[in-house]
Amino acid sequence: MTSSERAAEIDLEALRHNVRHLRDVAHPARVMAVVKANAYGHGALPVARAALEAGAAWLGVAHISEGVALRKAGIEAPILAWLHTAATDFTAGVEHGLDLGISGWELERVTAAARELERPAIVHLKIDTGLGRNGCPPDRWDALLSRAVAYQEEGLIRVVGIFSHLAVADEPTRPETDLQVQAFREAVAAAENAGVDVEVRHLANTPATFSRPDCHFDLVRVGLGIYGLSPFSDQGSADLGLRPVMTLSTTVSNCKEVPAGQGVSYGYGYRTQKPTTLGLIPVGYGDGVPRIATGAPVLVGGRIYPVVGRIAMDQLVIDFGATGLVDSPESPLGERAVLFGGADSPPVEDWAAAAQTINYEVVTRIGDRVERVYLDARQEAHDDDGA
């Protein structure tokens, strides 16, 4: 247990296990570990290093600024950045050797940066196969290919990849994925016919990596899976051979006995039914804990207690359901309180259900006020050897 007041413990060996497992599932396709959004709240640089150690061949980020930060920290592996705005610093992306996802309008900005730096940009062209977000519309794909090939012949870019993103792969029986796969194959064929020497085709996200081997192509982009979480509603982490990486914990900061009828937190949405002991847990929506997650589980002393009342900015309340605790040897004051995590902890999916959201959001939104504590069995073994 960390001595931090509130901590997200990040098990890097669990993360390595997940990457190795996903690499085996995807073989012979390679693995891109997606570390955008501060590695889904887990910490981009430690996660990136651990993922590469475990055999990830690429890293994926949303923004060029995220990729540049990894480069400045010494990461040399291929990094793809795919989400850009008119204010994006494409020059920095080209200068730091990032692979750049191109949906259309960005191509001229990227080639201008390449011309200025006298260095070709590395480009992956993105086709919208049905998700409806970024990606080139199919009716403009041939025109984008023509422009890209012309710039490549000028030596301004090198097109190495074609990619897209799936919309409903977390629901494996839905037919839309078949349509997207077919559209993707047609887009790749058009690129090859236009003269693009495609090195990497990538379409699969975490759910498709597990459920659609026909989507693996040359590279799979896995985010949620490397963090040990399942994208499926009917399968948990263990069912997929994954180990949750983040454990969110703090300590019981106060406990007190209250009478029946005691209102709890703003709005008095909860009142005690009998005399009981309330415990104060010092995390709240200011730490990224979902405000609406009343009823979510907190583990204290080997037992699960529900969150009662409205979650506040800095704190939430649990009901121990008994009296006589405060001045007894069994007082929970100062005890570790685990909101979610790995083995023997409440699963993050229980918090997602209470918050009417998905596990992705719960871990990603945990804020900077919560210290990240990195647990690394490999480093601990090294230290134990006296090195």
Image (cartoon, grey):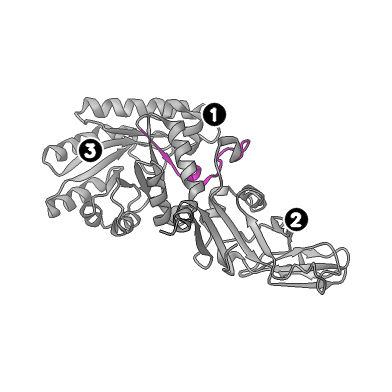
Q: Residue furthest front?
A: 386
Q: Secondary structure at mark 1?
A: loop
Residue 28 is tagged as none
The label nearer to you, 3 versus 1, is 3
Residue designated by label 3: 159
Residue at left offset 43%, top offset 35%: 23
Image position, residue 370 (x, y; %): 54, 65
Q: Residues under labels 3 and 2: Cα distance? A: 55 Å
Q: Secondary structure at mark 3?
A: strand
Instruction: Name above or below for residue 169 compared with residue 261.
Output: above
Q: Is residue 382 left or right of residue 156?
A: right
Q: Secondary structure at mark 2?
A: strand
Residue at left offset 43%, top offset 25%: 214
Whichever of callouts 3 and 2 sits on the residue coming sooner in the sequence is 3
Kind of residue at disc 2: Arg
Image position, residue 323 (x, y; %): 86, 68
Q: Residues under labels 2 and 1: Cα distance? A: 39 Å
Q: Nearer the viewer, residue 59 or 383?
A: 383
Whichever of callouts 3 and 1 sits on the residue coming sooner in the sequence is 3
Residue designated by label 1: 174
Image position, residue 122 (x, y; %): 23, 44
Callout 1: few (<14), some (14-19), or many (20+) C-alpha neighbours within 10 Å?
few
Callout 2: few (<14), some (14-19), or many (20+) C-alpha neighbours within 10 Å?
few
In the rendered view of the protein, which quadrant contains the C terminus? bottom left
Q: Nearer the viewer, residue 258 or 269?
A: 258
Question: What are the residue bounds of the magenta stretch?
Answer: 219-236
Residue designated by label 2: 303
The answer to which quarter of the image holds residue 257 is bottom right
Kind of residue at disc 3: Val
